[in-house]
Amino acid sequence: MKNATRWALQAGLTIMCTGCLTDPELKLDYEGYEPEALSDGWQVSGAADEGLDPEMLEGIYRDFFREDGFPTARGLLVVRHGKLVAEAYARDRADRERYHNVQSVAKSVTSLAAGIALDDGLLPSVDVPLFDLMPQHFDDDPRKRSLSLRHALTMQTGLAPYSDEDTGAFMYSDGSSVEKILHQPLVSDPGTSFYYTDDSPQLVSAAVQTATGRSLEAFAAERLFAPLGITGWRWEHHGDGVTFGAIGLWLRPRDMARIGQMVLQGGTWQNRRVVSEQWLEESMQIRANGDYGYYWWVYDEGRVIGAKGAGGQMIFIVPELDLVVVMTCDSSSQSWLLSPGIGDLVSRILQAVRD
């Protein structure tokens, strides 16, 4: 399993982990990876006590702090058996308490919120036509009126996507974000073509808002963040009041780990049900593009689940190893260059598991 998983991680992270090269000498001196025990709900433990090789972790973290190898790296956390066993911040120790732009990790959080709305019966099913929820945003094209929530969750709406260059301008434009998306021309029949885009999650966000009567941010605050003990975050929204379903979410690294651990535990946190196990199982079945579910990346036949964001933001979940890995990197620059070796670094964490 480990060799296959290593290959899958390398393939996925080579594409995902990019970021601008930073000025030299921006990293701190390495002082170890032992996490500090805080009154924040996390139990900390020693790496060896949780079946991880301390010397291997030492080498991994020393490499993470290198200026030349991982210039964009900021934070790296490892959770094993539900306990925080390793944590360090290479650029600023204050990053532990700082909200971090998680980029497209927001998509996976949107998927969780949609699942909770479905669990609550507020959304009738994944096959509900979006036209039934918000007919005012549609034009007269009958094919568009067949678009379902499932099509949006799998990024198979068939609507012409906005390019990466246009996404920022679109997201912060005037008017209705939902209407702008739905008025794009259809370039394929719904359900037949995969386009990775920020447009589809915006439709899911609008669907959640319509079904619950609250914005995605407000609904997630009550039904997702509060049960997880996440007390601080920031989630941006369009001028029309619709929370960005794809981007704009800012979280603390330990709170990213809470999300990962809750998913690892089948949708529970501290013996409280947050999202149904059925929804997680459905979300993490490959639906499109060979390795994508409902806004979760699925590798090695489901052995590794990933929430990934541009620049190197990630939550990786490895159920067979009872392991969660969280990474944050600098995502502030608009100049993108490959940050080599990140996939190998994460694979080494999996290899450090000894039991």
Image (tube, grey):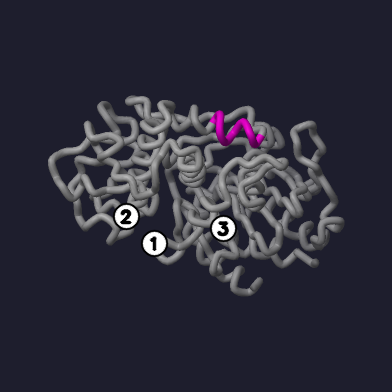
Q: Could you tell me the amino acid type at mark 1?
A: Ala
Q: Return the x and y of residue 60 as percentages of the image width and height.
A: 72, 58
- Residue to which mark 1 is pinned: 288
Instruction: Identify which residue, 212 or 229, lies in the foreground.
Output: 212
Residue depicted at 29% across the width and 30% down the height: 173
| Residue 223 belongs to magenta span | yes
- Residue to which mark 2 is pinned: 156
Residue depicted at 27% across the width and 26% down the height: 174
Q: Is residue 132 above or below residue 296?
A: above
Secondary structure that dominates the magenta span = helix
Report, in whole angstroms, how far the alpha carbon at label 2 lies from the one at label 3.
Answer: 20 Å
| Residue 336 belongs to magenta span | no
- Residue to which mark 3 is pinned: 305
In the rendering, which numbered label is found on residue 273? none
Q: Return the x and y of residue 227 as percentages of the image width and height.
A: 63, 34
Stretch of the chain drawn in magenta: 221-228
Q: Is residue 178 above or below residue 240?
A: below
Q: Are marks 2 and 1 in contact (CB under 8 Å)?
A: yes
